């Protein structure tokens, strides 16, 4: 038995059209899963990459600006064994200037939608007496404060707490709930940071690995957490950060 194989499993990855979600979708497909690429943008590039390696994937339209939409998405789908709550957004402003609109926009997608998507996944799994795996995408800002991203930091601290709560409720019912906390990754999400020479240097100086992560650096942890190798993992938040938190 290959304990890292995902043969015969179906995974749904939110925000799979780009960045970390795309890398995770491709890696899960490489490990044998059929991947449902859920999001508000066409995941054409992700589907092409998965098809090129002989994997199975399809698009599932899902806009999490309606945070309850993720809970409903499972109603129309074949059984899903693995959920990756990856979709996320970030808005930057000084805390004294931060608006309610920017607070709600980030909390709705990053935290509220992640919860109701997990709830929809679990309800569908329990209805067919099945288990599964949920992998939430947390952040270094699940552990640290950061600056100028109050709703993002609150959402990612929330994701860490939610990961633990859901693990406590569902471990005994066959669902493994865990999270990955990526370090600083080259994606759309970090464009502004990388374009700021002062912030970019401060970040690089603190990363023991000496470089930003590529999305693919994050994907192996997702394959592990989705696989039988992680059967006894519950409520863990695994940093994949080039050593940032160890510093
Ligand atoms: P990204 O390239 O900007 O990807 C974000 C994904 O979320 C995109 O697919 C985006 O879709 C999707 N999304 C945003 N709002 C959505 C909505 N309303 N409905 C459905 N999908 C929506 O950034 P990324 O860095 O890969 O981010 C992926 C996850 O990693 C996020 O949860 C982020 O917080 C987390 N993370 C990133 C870093 C980093 O350094 N990059 C570090 C720690 C954690 P569109 O393309 O349509 O916008």
Image (tube, rainbow, N blue to C red):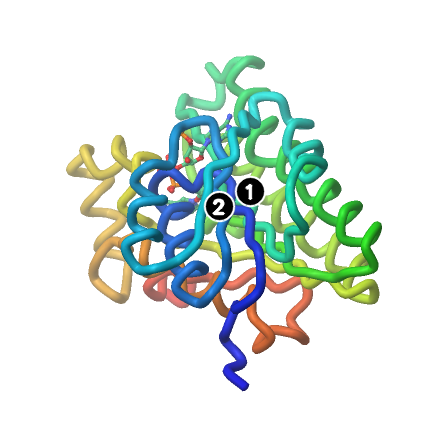
Packing grade of label 1 (10 A; few <14, some 14-19, many >=20) is: many
Q: Quadrant of the C terminus?
A: bottom left
- First in sequence: mark 2 vs mark 1: 2
| Element type where label 1 sits in the image | helix
Q: Specify the label residue 141 is tagged with.
A: 2
Q: Is mark 1 within 8 Å of ligand 1?
A: yes
Q: Which residue lies furthest to the bottom in this view?
A: 1
Identify the residue at image location x=27%, y=66%.
208
Q: In which quarter of the image is the N terminus?
A: bottom right
Q: How far apart are marks 2 and 1 (CA)?
A: 6 Å
Identify the residue at image location x=51%, y=49%.
137
Q: Nearer the viewer, residue 245 or 56?
A: 56
| Element type where label 2 sits in the image | helix
Give the side of residue 80 with respect to residue 43, left or right.
Answer: right
Question: Is 146 drawn above or below residue 228 in the view shown?
Answer: above
Residue 90 in the image, given as x and y percentages of width and height: 44, 30
Packing grade of label 2 (10 A; few <14, some 14-19, many >=20) is: many
Identify the residue at image location x=33%, y=49%.
184
The image quadrant where one finds ligand 1 is top left
């Amino acid at each position: 038995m290959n304990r890292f194989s995902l043969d015969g499993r179906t995974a749904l990855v939110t925000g799979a059209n780009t960045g970390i979600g795309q890398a995770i979708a491709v890696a899960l497909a490489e490990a044998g899963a059929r991947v449902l690429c859920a999001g508000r943008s066409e995941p054409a590039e992700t589907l092409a990459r998965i098809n090129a390696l002989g994997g199975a994937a399809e698009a599932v339209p899902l806009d999490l600006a309606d945070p309850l939409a993720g809970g409903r998405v499972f109603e129309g789908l074949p059984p899903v064994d693995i959920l990756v709550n990856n979709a996320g957004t970030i808005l930057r402003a000084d805390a004294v200037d931060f608006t309610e609109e920017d607070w709600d926009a980030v909390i709705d997608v990053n935290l509220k939608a992640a919860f109701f998507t997990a709830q929809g996944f679990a309800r569908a799994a329990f209805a067919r007496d099945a288990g599964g795996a949920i992998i939430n995408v947390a952040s270094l800002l699940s552990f640290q404060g950061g600056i100028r991203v109050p709703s993002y930091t609150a959402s990612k601290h929330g994701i860490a707490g939610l990961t633990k709560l859901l693990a406590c409720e569902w471990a005994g019912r066959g669902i493994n709930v865990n999270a990955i906390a990526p370090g600083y990754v080259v994606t759309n999400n970090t464009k502004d940071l990388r374009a700021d020479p002062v912030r970019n240097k401060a970040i690089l100086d603190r990363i023991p690995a000496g470089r930003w992560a590529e999305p693919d650096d994050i994907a192996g942890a997702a394959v592990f957490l989705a696989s039988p190798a992680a059967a006894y993992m519950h409520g863990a938040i695994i940093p994949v950060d080039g050593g940032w938190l160890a510093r």
